[in-house]
Image: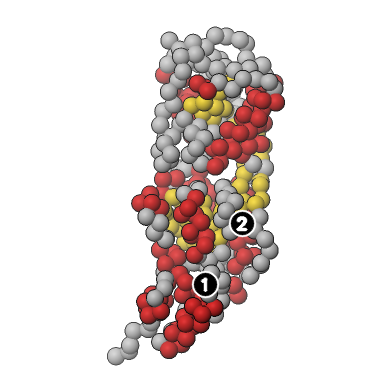
Amino acid sequence: MSLKKPSMRDIAREVGTSAVTVSKALAGKTGMSDSMRERILKKAAEMGYENPRGSGSATKEHLDIGILIPDKYFETDSYYAGIYRQLVRKLSEAGHFAVLELLGAEQEKSMTLPNLLTAGHADGLILLGEPGRAYCRKIVQEGPPAVLLDFCDEQANADAVAGDNSYGTYRLTSHLIREGHREIGFVGNIRATGSIMDRFLGYYRAMLMNDLQVHEEWILPDRELTGGLVKPELPETLPSAFVCNCDMTARMMIGLLEERGFRVPEDVSVTGFDDYPPGSGNEIGLSTFRIDTESMIELAVKALLERCAGDGKPFGRTVVGGQPVYRESEIPHDDKDQTLH
């Protein structure tokens, strides 16, 4: 009868530390004192531990890459589900494996590390969908090399690859202004995510650059801070156009306006962001901003693989551009009155 082989958890229990610290020590990574590393390596040898992942994942030809996404952002047809599918394809083409773990709200609140980390099952991590800042920093600090995708955190020691959110809404808002719109609102909870804040700042910049007033009553929240979408409350007097922080919100806004008897775009123009999801054939074509997600994913994977290979260059942020896409949801303004009835 063979004896059970010791695991990283067994070593961690004996040394009095976490399985994540044991995993990092066995892989030769930083994040602990020299004395702690010595104790872990000594205890692993005493217990006859055999590392199934080899002595350092950086030299592995096939890496296991964990993809962490907050559960609130991951639905079948969501933007992040689409990004995840592209990530899996890109990693597979490079000969690596993708392992998905969804992060629950309670998990973030209690600062409980993902199973991928505690079990030592990931050579590298891609964080997608902007987990809470404190939780994100904890994962980056205690886990393997990580890349933040579609968001950034200047206090996390990790590379970030994000779309040019501010430039995108600046382009869309500037386009509306050139088409004659002077009263333009913004739809999005600017404190919910850094991406929404950046998109608001792009809208705000375009308004200021053109000496146009930003009315507080036309800045409409579209979601709770926890991420759940809510219907915006329309003000009594409407602007001639709304710049929305994403396509999902834009379509929700179009539906709400039409319920109240307004025509889009004849009465109120609406723009979105992301160019995703495509929508059904019966919906009005949505003017939006399309980030080059293919390049964004390619750069994120490249940065992570370099980190896994031991690249010690300073952490950086890469911003990926895109292009506006103009469709039927906005038209030149003809100074009609938009009063809510």
Quarter of the image where one finds residue 157: bottom right
Quarter of the image where one finds residue 175: top right
322 in relation to 257, above or below: below
182 in relation to 310, above or below: above
Q: Which residue is situated farthest in the bottom direction here? A: 1
List x then y, in percent, for residue 264. Answer: 52, 19
337 in relation to 295, above or below: above
**Quarter that holds the C terminus:** top left
| Distance between the alpha carbons at the discs numbered 2 and 1 | 21 Å
List x then y, in percent, for residue 266. Answer: 56, 15
Q: Mark 2 touching mark 1, by CB under 8 A?
A: no
Q: Is residue 284 visible?
A: no
Quarter of the image where one finds residue 101: bottom left
* Mark 2 neighbour class, 10 Å CA radius: few under 14, some 14 to 19, many 20 or more: many
What's the residue type where badge 2 is placed? Asp
- For residue 32, side relative to residue 304 (left or right): left
In the foreground, 174 or 156? 156
Disc on the earlier residue, 2 or 1: 1
**Quarter that holds the N terminus:** bottom left
What's the residue type where badge 1 is placed? Met
In the foreground, 82 or 221? 221
Q: Which mark is residue 159?
A: 2
Q: Which residue is mark 1?
A: 32
SS state under label 2: strand
- Name the residue rendered at 51%, 41% in the picture: 193
List x then y, in percent, for residue 256. Answer: 43, 22
List x then y, in percent, for residue 330. Answer: 59, 22
- Which of pointers 2 and 1 indicates the residue nearer the eye? 1
Q: Is residue 31 visible?
A: yes
- Name the residue rendered at 42%, 60% in the picture: 114
Q: Which mark is residue 138?
A: none
